[in-house]
């Protein structure tokens, strides 16, 4: 059966289109969700986070005096450490010349007693910092004299010097060289050899 | 709802959505920022807590540094301490025997200011002395309580002519003595540390270790020990060609110096010896040798030659010092064991020899080093006979010296009837007569008068005879 609506147009019952309905529902749902989210975020999470931050800041304020104490200690330590480094540097670059010269006297005397050589010096110059180019650090120089006609005695002396405790803080002496310097018939032996002695001070690292 | 109403609703709802979205976005952003801040603060707190965990260790380190700094202030002079330094150098010169010829403030080498609060101060000294006086001076400088170091040293050996010319001071020495003045400047007060003293007590070992690292290793200088000066030409002129014509060189001095040198060589051998048996043997031999050298030294001093040239005099004097040092080393090595039998024998022989020559003062000098030990050594069965012999010899020598001091040396012998009398003092005394307490005339002959003093017989030869002497 066919039904015909004969009511005037404005009296006819109109149906809301489904799309509109869906849009309205979606908007309402969306807004409700957004509102809920904002409410939860603003009055739930954010307050909790701010409370946590307050607690942390309180904790931070609590440890501030300890931190200030720590930093003051660090500053004091840095001041002392700088001083200690300076003194350590001074101590490391220093050398006991008493020890070195005493050991040199030992080598000279022992060699004389063993009749390996008869050495003496005309001068000596020792410096913990050599000013000359090509020299690493401290240096000891001496004008040596060997009271023997045998120049090989100088080599024996240099060997003894290198092997002695004296040699532990110095580089090996340069190979022997020299010349007959004096002939004095009134003395025994009448002929002596002059030779230069030069040794460089080893650094702390080179000694180890 | 009609279409327009629906449209209005939808538009309004749309605007509301946009607004709510904005709120949510802003809220999220703020939340994220708050969370980030929480994270940052939390991480900072964690980091600071890690830092604070190190505070006890830091406190310990600072306490150690303070102690070291205190030591530093003690060893480095302040401006006022520099005057003390100069006074110290004077004392070192007197103790070592070197003579200071000049003392000048010098420009420090390298940086004058070190580490901000250490200022280098340098003096240049010109000295005169022999090698061992120099070594002794260097030792005093380098082992001084105040930090002193010698950055530069020059020795110019004396020429042989200068040595023979009678100069006592031989080598010209030029050296720099450097120290650092501690000038800490304005610095904040030390941070208060709770229980600092207690904590420091726990750190004494560390403080000591760190201090040691800062101070140069000290060297023990043990004197000349019979060694020769390496800046003196050791060659001797052949006999008859010595510079002082007509002056006979006594072989005794040369052999004494050589003997001391050999004794030191034996000492070094003894020090290097690892075998206890070998060491004991060497020690006994060395004891004997040293006592022999001591006897020789006493004789040399008794007959000291005024004409010996200065280098010989210096050599002998330094050999004497060296012998004393060796004796001290030997005594220290023997510790509380007291002198050995070998030494007692040698002392006894030396005393006999001196007493035989009438040198009772030298005999007492010979026993002096061991006399303090004789009382307890008498309880040692092995050494008791030697102790008794030495005590007896010492008592005899003392009696002889005291007797001489009383002035009863006989001037002659005269006959009085059947009996002889000795001229003693201002009168004559006869056999058996008491002169004073503990002093009797034991016998009188033409050759000698024997006194009895404190139970000991003391013989004195008669120097001259009065005419009409009575021969018995």
Image (tube, rainbow, N blue to C red):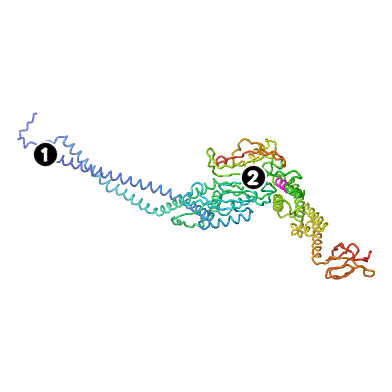
The tag on residue B368 is none
The quarter in which the N terminus of chain B is drawn is: top left
Tag 1 residue: B4
Query: Marks 1 and 2, Cα distance to the nearest angstrom?
Result: 116 Å
* Location of residue B261 in the rendering, given as x and y in whole percent from the top left corner: 72, 47
From the viewer's perspective, tell me whether residue B353 is left or right of residue B60.
right
* Location of residue B221 in the rendering, given as x and y in whole percent from the top left corner: 64, 50
Q: How many marks?
A: 2
* Location of residue A45 in the rendering, given as x and y in whole percent from the top left corner: 30, 47
From the viewer's perspective, tell me whether residue B434 is left or right of residue A60.
right
Crowding near pointer 2: few (<14 within 10 Å), some, many (20+)?
A: some
Q: Which residues are magenta?
A: B260-268
* Location of residue B378 in the rendering, given as x and y in whole percent from the top left corner: 78, 58
Tag 2 residue: A103
Which marked residue is nearer to the observer: mark 1 or mark 2?
2
**Mark 1 falls on what kind of element?**
helix
* Prevailing secondary structure of the magenta residues: helix
Subunit of mark 2?
A
Location of residue B383 with respect to A129 vertically, above or below: below
Location of residue A121 with respect to B119 vertically, above or below: above
């Amino acid at each position: 059966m066919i039904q015909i609506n004969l009511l005037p147009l404005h009296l006819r019952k109109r149906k809301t289109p489904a799309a509109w309905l869906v849009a309205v529902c979606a908007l309402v749902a969306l807004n409700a969700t957004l509102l809920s989210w904002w409410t939860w975020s603003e009055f739930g999470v954010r307050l909790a986070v701010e409370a946590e931050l307050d607690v942390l800041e309180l904790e931070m304020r609590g440890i501030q005096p300890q931190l200030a104490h720590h930093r003051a200690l660090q500053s004091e330590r840095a001041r002392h450490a700088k001083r200690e480094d300076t003194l350590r540097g001074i101590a490391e670059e220093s050398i006991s010349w008493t020890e070195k010269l005493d050991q040199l006297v030992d080598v000279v005397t022992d060699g004389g007693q063993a009749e390996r050589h008869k050495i003496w010096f005309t001068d000596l110059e020792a410096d913990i910092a050599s000013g000359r180019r090509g020299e690493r650090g401290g240096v000891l120089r001496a004008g040596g004299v060997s009271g023997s006609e045998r120049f090989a005695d100088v080599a024996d002396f240099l060997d003894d010097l290198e092997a002695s405790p004296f040699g532990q803080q110095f580089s090996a002496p340069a190979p022997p060289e020299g010349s007959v310097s004096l002939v004095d018939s009134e003395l025994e032996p009448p002929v002596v050899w002059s030779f230069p002695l030069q040794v460089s001070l080893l650094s702390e690292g080179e000694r180890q | 709802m009609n279409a327009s109403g629906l449209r209005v609703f939808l538009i309004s709802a749309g605007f509301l959505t946009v607004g709510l979205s904005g709120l949510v976005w802003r809220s999220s952003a703020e939340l994220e920022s708050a969370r980030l801040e929480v994270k940052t603060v939390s991480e900072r707190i964690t980091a600071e807590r890690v830092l604070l965990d190190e505070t006890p260790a830091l406190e310990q380190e600072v306490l150690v540094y303070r102690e070291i700094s205190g030591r530093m202030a003690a060893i480095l002079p302040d401006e006022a301490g520099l005057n003390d330094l100069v006074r110290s150098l004077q004392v070192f010169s007197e103790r070592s025997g070197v003579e200071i010829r000049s003392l000048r403030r010098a420009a420090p080498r390298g940086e004058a200011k070190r580490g901000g609060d250490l200022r280098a101060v340098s003096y240049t000294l010109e000295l005169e002395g022999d090698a061992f006086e120099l070594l002794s001076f260097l030792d005093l400088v380098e082992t001084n309580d105040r930090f002193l170091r010698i950055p530069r040293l020059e020795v110019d050996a004396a020429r042989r002519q200068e040595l023979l010319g009678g100069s006592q001071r031989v080598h010209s020495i030029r050296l720099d003595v450097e120290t650092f003045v501690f000038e800490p400047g304005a610095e904040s007060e030390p941070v208060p540390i709770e229980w600092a003293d207690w904590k420091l007590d726990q750190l004494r070992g560390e403080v000591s270790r760190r201090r040691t690292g800062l101070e140069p290793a000290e060297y023990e200088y043990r004197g000349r020990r019979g060694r020769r000066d390496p800046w003196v030409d050791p060659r001797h002129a052949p006999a008859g060609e010595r510079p002082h014509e007509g002056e006979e060189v006594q072989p005794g001095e040369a052999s004494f110096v050589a003997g001391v040198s050999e004794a030191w060589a034996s000492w070094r051998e003894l020090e290097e010896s690892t075998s206890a048996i070998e060491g004991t043997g060497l020690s006994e031999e060395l004891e004997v040798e040293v006592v022999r050298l001591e006897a020789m030294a006493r004789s040399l001093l008794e007959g000291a030659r005024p004409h010996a040239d200065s280098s010989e005099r210096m050599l002998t004097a330094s050999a004497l010092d060296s012998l004393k040092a060796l004796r001290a080393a030997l005594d220290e090595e023997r510790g509380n064991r007291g002198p050995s039998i070998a030494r007692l024998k040698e002392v006894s022989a030396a005393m006999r020899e001196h007493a035989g020559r009438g040198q009772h003062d030298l005999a007492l000098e010979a026993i002096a080093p061991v006399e303090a030990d004789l009382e307890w050594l008498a309880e040692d069965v092995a050494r008791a006979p030697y102790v008794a012999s030495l005590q007896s010899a010492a008592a005899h020598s003392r009696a002889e010296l005291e007797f001489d001091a009383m002035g009863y040396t006989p001037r002659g012998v005269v006959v009085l009837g059947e009996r002889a009398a000795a001229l003693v003092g201002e009168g004559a005394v006869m056999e058996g007569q008491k002169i004073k307490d503990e002093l009797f005339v034991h016998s009188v002959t033409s050759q000698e008068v024997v006194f009895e003093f404190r139970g000991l017989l003391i013989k004195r030869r008669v120097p001259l005879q009065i005419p009409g002497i009575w021969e018995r």
